[in-house]
Image: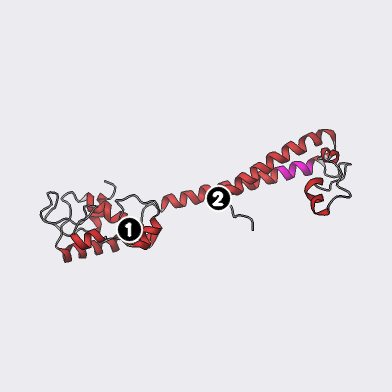
Amino acid sequence: MPARIGAAGHSKLCFGLGLLATVALVPGLCAGRPLAFLSSLPSTRGTDPRHARATSGPALPETGALGGSAAVAALVGCLALGRRVTRGNLLQRRAEEKHLEPSEKTIETMMKFSNQYAKVTGTKYCEDKSVPAVVIVGLALHKETLGAPLCPCRHYEDKEKEVKDGYWNCPCVPMRERHECHCMLFLKDNNPFASECSTIDLEEIMKLKDG
């Protein structure tokens, strides 16, 4: 079964076909016999019919039935298809870039979780409130894109796999077992960066989330 190719592959394929058509058709246009060069290929009569189609080329008459205008139209159509696919790629990429910031609703959800968890564990937020703001937005983004609040402060080769493993889903295992937060979101009282505050509101997050 042929391999499936993405939009970028289709664009390259169409561009390649366009170039092939140019090379094949332009000499024939000048001579009034598009693709006439194919008539010089060795005859496949008497050979295995399974190979005839692959070696004989398109069954076009040598009298120029495929006119110059039709050949140009075919080439233009092929290139136009490539442009449409490329444009679709760009639009998809822009849509993905816009989604780099989670919705305010998801941010609020993760904010409520963080405030509640800090209260239950007796931990505090960093004295620099931009730290919990950025971390909470990162958790919200992973919540939307991955389905779980994967720790946003670590590098992962495969985020989907990490989500399934659950080790770094907030609250991560080190936090649950030893109150060690890699993101400095939940800090113990003896941490020199801990504040006296264990709550943050949505207005603060939206104001500080960009650093």
The residues colored magenta run: 69-75
Closer to us: 24 or 182? 182
The residue shown at (21%, 52%) is 184
In this view, 12 is above or below 151: above
Identity, as a three-letter code, of the amino acid under mark 1:
Leu
Q: Please, what is the dominant secondary structure of the magenta stretch?
A: helix
Instruction: Tell us which disc is closer to us: 1 or 2.
Output: 1
- Element type at mark 1: loop
Q: x and y percent of residue 23 in the render?
A: 73, 36
**From where the camera sits, is residue 206 visible?**
no
Q: Say which residue label 1 marks.
A: 150
Q: x and y percent of residue 169 in the render?
A: 31, 60
Q: Give residue 46's mark.
A: none
Identity, as a three-letter code, of the amino acid under mark 2:
Gly
The residue shown at (11%, 56%) is 189
Q: Say which residue label 2 marks.
A: 88
In the image, residue 84 lies in the stretch drawn in magenta:
no
In this view, 155 is above or below 38: below
- Alpha carbons under labels 1 and 2: distance apart: 30 Å
**From where the camera sits, is residue 31 visible?**
yes
Q: Residues within 10 Å of mark 2 (few under 14, many from 20)?
A: some
Q: x and y percent of residue 142 in the render?
A: 35, 57
